[in-house]
Each structure stands twice: as structure tokens, then as C-alpha cells.
Image (cartoon, rainbow, N blue to C red):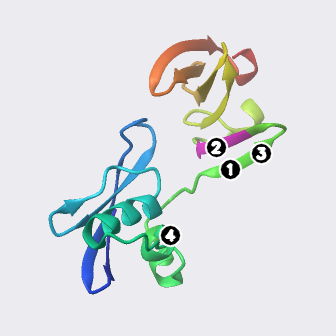
Amino acid sequence: MVIECDLNNLSFIISVVQSVQNPLKSGFQCTCNTIKSNVESNPSAAIKTCYRKIFGTKTEYSGQAVMGFENEIIIQQLIDDVEFFPIFLQIENFNVIISSIGNLDENKFYGVSTGFVSSFTARYRSAQHLFVLKIEENQCNLEIYLESQYTNQIIGQTPDDV
């Protein structure tokens, strides 16, 4: 996704790119003419860095506002062809993201079946890890990542097994 906006009579382009630190996350880069920001973790930081390189000031802009995420028309255009929105849940101390519902089957694992994918982060072996649960045709996989590196996998017949 690329958004162009005018700030102080110059055209700034904000691009959503892959994060340098973690390829599983989004990053943001701002470009104006030949000046580019580094890949930042949020659009505000990318705009601020690029703007500062050009004008030498500490003016700050809201990345969300500049990218149009406060404009209902832009939001509607962004979601028109989206068939599924991730679901964010807080279960006790865990923030769980359901990124794919998969097939619905009331006779299987809590109403879901093949194609279901969820994830959460938690401390494991003294470090923060990403856990990704995938329900596949004949098994359930719990993949464990440290940063973006795959570290372990637990396989079972049901989500309760893993």
C-alpha cells in the first residue's frame, strides 16, 4: 500500500513495507523526492524522519491521519475487497489474533476446522515467543517462533493436544 500526501507544499509518499527487524511485521517508509526515511515501525516515525531530513525541523504529523485512516471514504475503499478481518481477543493475559477462520464445522474443534489460524505471544524459555496454531486436514500444529526464526513445532490431533 502506498499513500501520497502534501506536506509544506512537497509530495511525501508513505509505503507499507516489510519490517527489517521482523519480516512477519509491517514497516513504514516515507519518501520525498530523493530523500527516504529508514523503515520504521509506524507511519508517524517514518514521516517525522523524512520531514526532518528535508526541513531540519521537529514538526510532527500523525501517520494515521496522513495515511487517511481517519477518512471514512478511504477506509471503505481499503476494505471493499477484503473477505476477512483479523479478530483480536484478549483471553486472560493473552492477546490472541485469529487471522483465518478456515472451514466452520460445529462437530469439530470448538466449531472450526481446516484452515483455522490463530497466534499469540508469550514468554517461553526466558524469552518472548510467537505461537501460531494451525488446524490442517489431519492434524493441529503449534509453531513457535523467536523473533522471526522458527524454533519448535508441536503436533497433535486436536487443538487441546498442542
For the residues bearing labels 1 and 3, Cβ distance under 8 angstroms: yes
Where the N terminus falls, by quadrant? Answer: bottom left
* Range of residues picked out in magenta: 95-100
Choose between 156 and 121: the one closer to the eye: 121
For the residues bearing labels 3 and 2, Cβ distance under 8 angstroms: no
Disc 4: which residue: 64
Could you say where residue 5 lies in the image, as x and y percent from the top left? Answer: 33, 79
Task: Answer left or right for 4 relative to 97.
Answer: left
For the residues bearing labels 3 and 4, Cβ distance under 8 angstroms: no
Identify the secondary structure beneath mark 2: strand
- Categorize mark 3 by other alpha carbons within 10 Å: few (<14), some (14-19), many (20+): few
Identify the secondary structure beneath mark 1: strand
- Residue appearing at x 57%, y 20% in the figure: 144
- Residue appearing at x 49%, y 76% in the figure: 65
Residue 155, image quadrant: top right
Disc 1: which residue: 88
**Farthest-out residue, front:** 56
Q: CA distance from mark 4 to mark 1?
A: 20 Å
- Residue appearing at x 69%, y 23% in the figure: 123
Disc 2: which residue: 97
Task: Answer left or right for 81 relative to 135.
Answer: left
Disc 3: which residue: 90
